[in-house]
Image (spheres, grey):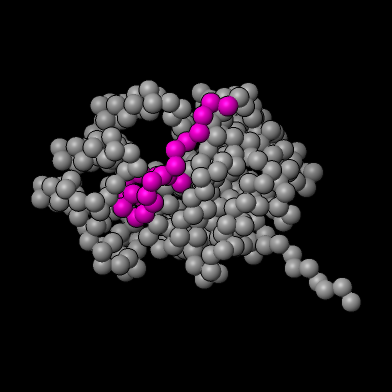
Amino acid sequence: MTPEVPKPNKVTVLLSTYNGSKFLQQQLESLYAQTYPNIRILARDDGSSDSTRSILENAQSGGRLEILDEHHNLGPALSFFELLQNAALTETEYVAFCDQDDVWHADKIAYAISALSMVADHHPALFCSRLEIVDEQLNHIGFTHTPRQIGFGNALVENVATGCTMVLNRKAIELICRHLPGKVLMHDWWCYLVLSCFGEVIFDNNTHIKYRQHGNNMIGAAVNIFDELKRKLHRFIYSGRGLLWLQAWLQASVFLNMFEKDVTLSQRLTLDKFIAAKSSLWCRVQLVLSKEIWRQKRFDNLVLRLIIFINRI
């Protein structure tokens, strides 16, 4: 008698689209080519006015994916959370966030599942990786950086887990869906914050995705030191009262309201200090001098502490 071979755990790829007809078909082809054998693609269109929905409907009629009926514009973060909630109602063991304009390596899902399978079943975990940045024709431009230290203090002020590289295990799905914020800057930053506090974040130094850099990117990656410096100066000088830092403060406030009873004492003290920094000079001084929060690069750390001290948070 031939022993029964266990079926691989189901992975649901969550694809949110918005006016992405130019590159969508190429991304879909890279999803179809995944070597992992048990993948379902769940798509949601966020109110496109081009032919994006027609491309998705053609794929659905061919049995290649499923589309959520609801398609009014929510913005990328809430659109992905809508997909995540729907996936959580199924028996899927993993979910992978997917952007409309990238190209995945054929082993992207298989590699992530292999890494996540080493985590205990009861433990929430998030897999993410570096990006290969390419132009519209998929010509190589560069690679994103490897973070030097991942953790809760970093997640409060910076996101190093790019959504299109992210895969969550079942416990992480359930954890995120228990407390979904009504408003958040980006879904991937929120996931990194939650998992850095209550689970495990696996960062892979290898790249499994070609991240297409083009004029319509919602949020692009800096491709060189000059581009990076330009963005930082723009955020600091021209973003109202430091929009990115204000969003971090607001996100921390929402996080504390949702998870107040679950955080450890040290995490609670860091959160209280970070939130109070907006109105307390003493808390600002404490944060500036402490290692409780950090960004990955030394220059960014200096800018962060300057912004906190002069109260542009």
Is 144 magenta? The answer is: yes
Q: Is residue 168 left or right of residue 306?
A: right
- Quarter of the figure with residue 206: top right
Q: Is residue 203 left or right of residue 50?
A: left
Residue drawn at 33 percent across, 49 percent down: 154
Of 269 and 146, nearer the camera is: 146
Q: Quadrant of the C terminus?
A: top left
Q: Is residue 263 left or right of residue 115?
A: left
Residue 65 in view of the camera: no
Residue 17 image offset from top left, x and y in percent: 59, 38
Residue 81 image offset from top left, x and y in percent: 51, 51
Of 81 and 269, nearer the camera is: 269
Q: Which residues are magenta?
A: 140-161
Is 215 magenta? The answer is: no
Rendered view: 88 above or below 310? below
Q: Quadrant of the N terminus?
A: bottom right
Residue drawn at 19 percent across, 37 percent down: 306
Residue drawn at 87 percent across, 73 percent down: 2
Residue 149 in view of the camera: yes
Residue 220 image offset from top left, x and y in percent: 47, 31
- Residue farthest along the left direction in this orientation: 282
Rendered view: 128 above or below 89? above
- Quarter of the figure with residue 231: top left
Residue 101 image offset from top left, x and y in percent: 60, 33
- Residue farthest along the right direction in this orientation: 1
Q: Please tell me how many numbered marks the rendered image carries.
A: 0
Residue drawn at 43 percent across, 58 percent down: 195
What type of secondary structure mainly makes up the magenta span?
A: loop
